[in-house]
Image (tube, grey):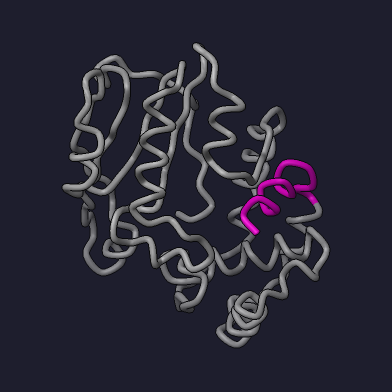
Amino acid sequence: NLINLFRCVRDKPNKLKYKLQYVLNSREDFNWIVSLHKRGLFPKFCDIDRAAKFYQLIRYSYAASLDSFACQPHSMWSDFPQIDMAARRLQKVVIENRDFEKLIRQYDRPVSFFYCDPPYVDTEDYYSNITFGRGGHERLRDTLLSVQGKFLLSYNDHPLVWEMYDRPGIYIERVTRLNNMKQRYDGGAQFPELFVSNYDQSERIRVLPEQLSFAS
């Protein structure tokens, strides 16, 4: 669903905006779309209808959880400039949906830069449609430790992460970010994270001019 959304944003932004311009911020409509999503019926819709329904779930759910109505006022029209901006940014981007190890091996070059955002340790059950676990974390580590290019990895501050990446030439930095869930009732709440890389993070590598997010 996420891959389909980004493809529609890239290739058919005007059609997507047309589908979104008169949707209702309604609990009843939201619960109906949730039921379609949980029954696995999204793939039965055309790509634009599927993308629009998934976008509604993201925008109208609490903390982009996809299943809990946020009860917050939000106009889809206010998102249209962001959709246009994302469409321009994605024009030369290849969008894939494959196993991370195959993708990293395929695109690895000395000039490659990989940013990875895996399921955080002990939160894997949050992702109902994937199986990750410790084996997945270790496979990601082994894949990244052998790349020719550079990588940056974001994780929760967990002892397992420190243990797995305690290797020569690996840098770990403690950082914090806004906690999207808590800040709604605790303004400015921070969440501790780790940045793991195979380069000195004091020498920043600028990849994007800005970050585009559909879940903020």
Q: Quadrant of the N terminus?
A: bottom right
194 relative position to 10: left or right? left
Eyeballing the image, is 161 above or below 113?
Answer: below
201 relative position to 43: left or right? left
Eyeballing the image, is 182 above or below 109?
Answer: below
Residue stretch in magenta: 1-14
198 relative position to 67: left or right? left
Q: Position of residue 201 (x, y in %)?
A: 27, 21
Residue 2: in magenta span: yes
Q: Residue furthest bottom?
A: 28
Q: Quadrant of the C terminus?
A: bottom left
What residue lies at 54% left-to-right and 31% top-to-bottom?
A: 104
Eyeballing the image, is 2 above or below 146?
Answer: below
Q: Position of residue 67 (x, y in %)?
A: 50, 76
Residue 172: in magenta span: no
Q: Position of residue 136 (x, y in %)?
A: 41, 49
What residue lies at 41% left-to-right and 39% top-to-bottom?
A: 140
Eyeballing the image, is 131 above or below 97?
Answer: below
Give the quarter of the image for residue 116. top left
What residue lies at 65% left-to-right and 78% top-to-bottom?
A: 33
Give the quarter of the image for residue 202. top left
Q: How many marks?
A: 0
Q: Position of residue 144 (x, y in %)?
A: 41, 29
Magenta-colored segment: predominant secondary structure: helix
In-front residue for pair 183/200:
200
In-front residue for pair 189/105:
105
79 relative position to 16: left or right? left
What residue lies at 69% left-to-right and 72% top-to-bottom?
A: 23
